[in-house]
Image: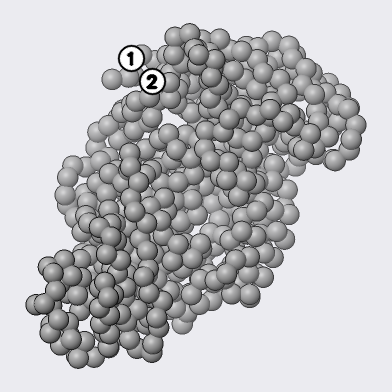
Amino acid sequence: MHKRNVVRSLGETERPRARYVKLSTIVVPLRISPLARAVVGSISPSVPAQFRRVLAAANTLTSPLIRKQIDMSLSPASALVCRDLRIPLDDGIELSADLYPVPSGLPAPVVVMFTPYLKGDVSPLLLQVPALSQAGMNVVVVDIRGTGDSGGVFQGPLSDQEASDGAEAVQWLAKQEWSTGRVGLAGFSYPGAIQLLIAARRPEGLACIAPGTAPIDFYRDWTHRGAIPSHTNWAALTFLQIGQRPECTSAAMDFYYGTAQALAEDGPEFWQRSPSNVLADIEVPIMFIGGLYDYFARGTLRGFDAATSPKRLVLGPWGHQYPQDPTELVDWYRYWLSDEGTDPTSSENVAVWRIGAEEWCFTTGRSMPAAPTVVSVGRTTIPVRSTQFGWPLVVTPSPVPVSMDMSTSSGMHLWGEDIVRPLGHVAGDIEGAPLVRMRLTAVGCTDADVYTRLSLEHPDGRIEQLTEGRLRLSHRAIDTQKSARYQDGSLESLHHTHVDPQPLPDHSVDVLIEMLPTSVRVPEGGQLLLGVSATRIDGVSRSAVINADELAIALPVLDVSTLD
């Protein structure tokens, strides 16, 4: 894998009704008039071929909807940029977009990303603009309503209005003279989730989507993983920055902290913003891209399982980002938007990286054993600390940059483990979401947040984090009708109800905690480790413990017959 250069803007000069193409030290104004075409024509013969292609592309973009400028970096991976393309909506609001047109200037398919994170911030980890441009795609990055340069007021993440805006914008983009009429959606995280909501509205011109590391359940994936408040920094980091309008910042903060984080239980405020509820309405092909170290990996796997349209799953060795190698993404759009290559959903449509073996494993459809492999730890006593700040300071090294957890307040890789129990060597390939089983009695508290982690101890003693799961114990109730099962009837994935929380009684109760998906082959001489920590939720500095009469983990160990 390799990194691509970041697309950079070389000029911020702005004049009314004029744009600029910057070619080394030559700056050529392009006016909105037939004169612009004459200017381009007069210069083209005297400049190198690659610059003539850039100017030809600029020549096709003299539309009144392009308000600000065109600029170009001369590095090989750079792209022509048309700033502040205005996309009109039916209610009079305009969305602002940046267009990266193909160098040829000919009509081309459109790949579009909708983002709340300011459209000018496009790096290879957000979207592979240079690779898509070189593959013959126009790329459009849009500020969603109420963010960046777009009009209107932000109505909270993944709102119904935002999905409606996106569907309108797709139809508008498909009808532009520089478009072939085929549109694909792109982006990861928030821009990944909104793809699913837009696609469910079936806008004309939409041909495929590729949501990366996307949450599909606003409550379970995003705001309250395991009913524990998570991503609490999101609105502050997204809106308390330069570029967001004050009225939109106020609305975003009010909703996110007054509703999304303030409500402890699942309900309509979360359902209507959850792509999981509309997956069956999507007809276009979907490629789910996820990271084995990503806190939204549950959404990636469960989204793939639930989708009914042609689909592909790529689950790789990265965190909360698109893969650095753009090949999968480019091939996806080339097939569905340009009729090039082979159908990526027809066979071997599941690609999963195997930690330990350090190789990709390909299957047609997702592999699942008939029954899980259960490894028991036995009786265990877990101390309940007063707050998260009391966790052990010694932490297994994070497999991703620490900034991922710090910036989102997800804490996926940063907590220390109070107890660690060896599980021994497990033969076979593990692929899916492990479930931790506990029969416990709490002493000294009526509720607690429990964190579980699965790690791999290599033969040389090095320890590598694999995955984790968490649960507020008062939210232990499970809707078995919405949970998935193995062939033997045991639970494969969990749907905790997250309503009507119940304090822990003074007798033992059964608790199940679903971990995020993982994929590992334990090397000979290596073993798995199960770590557990717990904290009070009442802030009281009083000793408490959880006595686990039974602690076990159910692992999705694949049958050898399911592997190529």
Q: Considering the numbered disc 1 on the image, is that residue within a helix, a strand or a loop?
A: helix
Where does residue 351 sit, x and y in percent of width and height? Answer: 34, 33
For residue 357, the mark is 2
- Label 2 to label 1, Cα distance in Å? 18 Å
Residue type (three-letter) at the residue carrying disc 2: Ala
Q: Considering the numbered disc 2 on the image, is that residue within a helix, a strand or a loop?
A: loop
Residue 96 can be seen in this image = yes
Circle nearer the viewer, 2 or 1: 2
In the picture, measured across the screen, residue 504 lies left or right of residue 6, that is: right
For residue 256, the mark is none
Q: Is residue 306 above or below residue 247?
A: above
The image quadrant of residue 260 is bottom right
The image quadrant of residue 86 is bottom left
Residue type (three-letter) at the residue carrying disc 1: Ser
Instruction: Provide the residue designation for mark 1.
Output: 561
Answer with mark 2 or mark 1, whichever residue precedes in sequence: 2
Local packing at callout 1 (Cα closer than 10 Å; few below 14, some 14-19, many 20+) is: few
Q: Is residue 207 above or below residue 398?
A: below
Q: Is residue 14 above or below residue 300?
A: below
Which is more toward the observer, 351 or 486? 351
Where does residue 523 sit, x and y in percent of width and height? Answer: 44, 13
Where does residue 477 sit, x and y in percent of width and height? Answer: 69, 33
The image quadrant of residue 366 is top left
Residue positioned 32% across, 57% down in the render: 129
Residue positioned 64% across, 36% down in the render: 414
Residue positioned 54% across, 71% down in the render: 243
Q: Residue furthest front?
A: 25
